[in-house]
Image: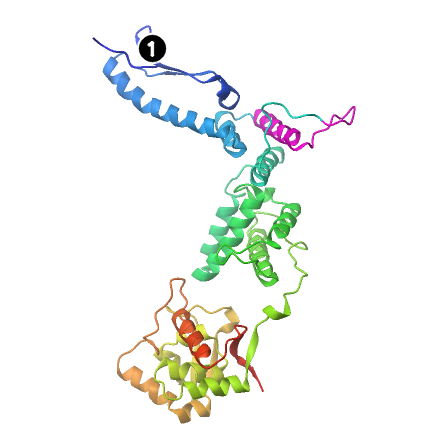
Amino acid sequence: MFRRMRYLQRRGSILWIRRPIPKRLWPIMQKREYLQSLHTGDQKTAERLASVELLRIERELADAERALTDPRLAARIAARITDDEDVLDDYLEEKLEADERARGEAFDEETDSPIPPGPNDRKMSDAERAATWALLRRNKNGDGASSDDNPLLSILFERYYKDRNLPPKTRLEWENARRRLTATLGGDVAIRSITKADVRRFKDSLVGSTSERTGKVITAATVRKLLGALGTVFWYAVRSGYVDVNPTQGVAQVLTKGKPEDRRLPFTLADVKAILEATEDERGEDFWMPRLALYTGARANELCGLLVRDAKTIDGVPCVVVEDSEVRTLKTASSTRRIPVHPELIRLGFLDFVERQRGAGQARLFPELTVGRYGSASAQYSKRFGRLLRSIGITDRRRYCTRHATP
């Protein structure tokens, strides 16, 4: 016996889908049923088309079920169903009012008495509440709809990355700032809707928060770095004509100083002597890195990424040229420089070492050092150097630098 496909009805010569919507989902879906023509009277063709459409409908209904307890999802569904911003605003305001009743924060304006929660009122989490406020604000101000001239926050960051070509590790840190701000805003919003009040809330959310990587409370220096990243991207937005005012200006400042016990310290003269003595019989980078750091003042990443061609004679003076290369990205533009080779390095045989590497056809001065996954030339050596320090009794992690060694 032929069995009709469920939710498939014939109207005249054409077959239609008619799928009722559960009553509890009517406020979210803003309709009581799906009614859709399949534009064919052929049963087999209609069933094939209906099987695809019904899968889509079931996914939408499943989303609506989840939206009963997720205001952000409910608002997205409402926005997708209607282009009427007033309808969406009314829905969001109703959600916020229900949340206020559930939290005991709703008061009758005439009697100034608390309004008790109803059976369907539910407390929203801080993230849900922030998301609902963000969506409501997006519709009520004129800057909520994203466009090419008013991009979403994520798109602004991507455009900045493309324009500036940030090192991978720096980009990772700045993405952390973007993700945290997005969480504070309750979603990926258009940049013109971001206000100074949002930046203040973002700053407040950072202070005392924990690192996603270590689980420890982030330091004041890290807070300043995250706020600085946000400020830089918004200055880019100002210069590019996306916004007229940088919302971080005058707000993204952290007055709290780091704890003295967290500050980095230079190596003492005794530390330097111990390091040099411990590496006196080493070869390659283990011998040269501490000495190059001491006599050039260069950073570890700059030295680990040196190319053989970076060692050259300029106006009769042996020099090391520090500049961007395929294995090294400098910290700042002003880091590009020429450093004369110290006579002590020449006495130790540094120039001879360079010539041996050149004669062996090496492109890098220290080819054994692999580049880390975030593009750092010093990632491998830094771990090795840390083990060296611990082996000679230097266990204070704040001591990290030979650039400012003290007696």
Locate residue 341 relative to residue 206 in the image: left or right: left
User: Residue 403: where, in percent of width, then height?
Assistant: 53, 80
- Quadrant location, the C terminus: bottom right
Within the magenta stretch, is there residue 110? Answer: yes
Q: Residue furthest bottom?
A: 347
- What is the basis of the colouring in this image? rainbow
Looking at the image, is 47 positioned above or below residue 94?
above
**Picture quadrant of residue 370:** bottom left
Residue that appears at 46% across and 77% down: 390
- Tell me, yes or no, if residue 318 can be seen here: no
Q: Residues within 10 Å of mark 1 (few under 14, many from 20)?
A: some
How many circles with numbers are drawn on the protein?
1
User: Residue 177: where, in percent of width, then height?
Assistant: 53, 53
Q: Which residues are magenta?
A: 86-114
Q: Residue furthest right?
A: 111
**Picture quadrant of residue 21:** top left
Residue that appears at 48% across and 28% down: 80
Q: Secondary structure at mark 1?
A: strand
User: Residue 104: where, in percent of width, then height?
Assistant: 68, 31
User: Residue 52: where, in percent of width, then height?
Assistant: 31, 24
Question: Taken as a whole, is the magenta stretch helix, strand or loop?
Answer: helix
Locate residue 61 relative to residue 250 in the image: left or right: left
Residue that appears at 50% across and 85% down: 272
Give the amino acid at mark 1: Gln
Taking depth in this image into account, of 233 and 345 the one nearest to the observer is 345
Please name the residue that numbered disc 1 is placed on.
Answer: 9
Taking depth in this image into account, of 169 and 195 the one nearest to the observer is 169
Residue that appears at 63% across and 67% down: 259
- Quadrant location, the N terminus: top left
Within the magenta stretch, is there residue 305? Answer: no
